[in-house]
Amino acid sequence: MPDKPLPNEDQFVTMVSVRDGNIYVTSARALVAKQNSIGLHIDTTLSEPPPFERAQPLTLLYTRGDRVLRLKAVVREPIDRERLTVQPVGDVAEGDRRDFRRADVDARVWAQAAGVPSVEEAMAAQSKRSVPLEEMETQSINLSGSGIQLDFPADKGPVKVSDLLDIRVELPLPSPSVIAVIGEVVSEPRDIDGTRRVAVRFTEISESDQDLVVYTVFSRYFEAEGLGEDLAHFEV
């Protein structure tokens, strides 16, 4: 299906698996992807799930453009602790609303108004601006695969709906990763306990950064909320 493709080689993939009534969120990279077999390398720096078993059901989540794609599969062959092959058991589907879950995350953040009218100009300016980690401040953000809610202090200047922001976030992963996004303010800033809170939709985010966001959101979501009614959604 050309408009809903399999993962690219070396693409970051979030694997959601159910075993003995427990749900596991695992990160992996696609080594090779064919219609009847996908080779995966588990990223043990981010997660270390129990050993996989043949025929174990799982769901692969990955991004393409601004979409989260979902593919149900079963384990075909566990090769070793870090590698396995899986067999798709259906067509690639576009994720539903549950695949755009949100999670509250404490992270180091830097943000400022892009000060330009177009996403292209904002991207060009972002590429020339390096932000040291010591300039990033820890705050509680609400994160999803498509956007973020964050504090934007008044000393950063005025901000209004449709303004573009240059945002950097250090995701709280075992191997911390800094992502860089351009976002558009989508609602009037709100004052919450003296702090200006801004809702932002991602207008430019790399596929690899979005895949890291999806993994972060899913792992934090299930850590906080448990399994609940999501079990049936991820079983084959």
Image (spheres, helix red, strand yellow):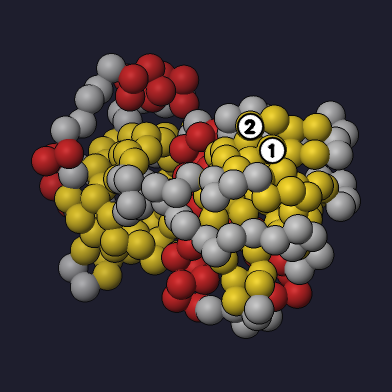
Residue 218 image position (x, y, % from top left) = 53, 61
Which mark, residue 31? 2
Label pair 1/2, CB-CB below 8 angstroms: yes
Disc 1: CA contacts within 10 A as few (<14), some (14-19) or many (>=20) = many
Q: Is residue 41 above or below residue 142?
A: above
* Residue occupying image coordinates x 31% and y 28%: 115
- Residue at point 26% right, 47% down? 109
Disc 2 on helix, strand or loop? strand
Find disc 1 in the rendering and name its residue. 39
Is 20 rendered above or below residue 168? below
* SS state under label 1: strand
Most foreground residue, 184 or 5: 5
Q: Residue at x 60, y 71 (%)?
A: 23
Q: Is the residue 45 above or below the residue 126 in the image? A: below
Specify the quadrant that holds the N terminus.
top right
Image coordinates of residue 147 in percent, x first then y, are: 48, 50
At which x and y percent is residue 160? 36, 46
Q: Is residue 8 left or right of residue 125?
A: right
Circle 2 Cα neighbour tier, 10 Å, few/some/many (<14 / 14–19 / ≥20)? some
Determine whether, in the image, residue 76 is placed left or right of residue 222: right
Residue 114: image quadrant is top left
Does the image show residue 101? no
Q: Earlier in the sequence, mark 1 or mark 2?
A: 2
In the picture, residue 10 is in which quadrant?
top right
Q: Which residue does the image show at 45% across and 41% down from the upper left?
A: 184
**How far is disc 1 from disc 2 in space, using C-alphas?**
5 Å
| Residue 183 appearing in the image | yes
Whole-percent x and y of residue 7?
A: 69, 35
Amino acid type, callout 1: Gly
43 w.r.t. 104: above or below: above
Q: Amino acid at mark 2?
A: Leu
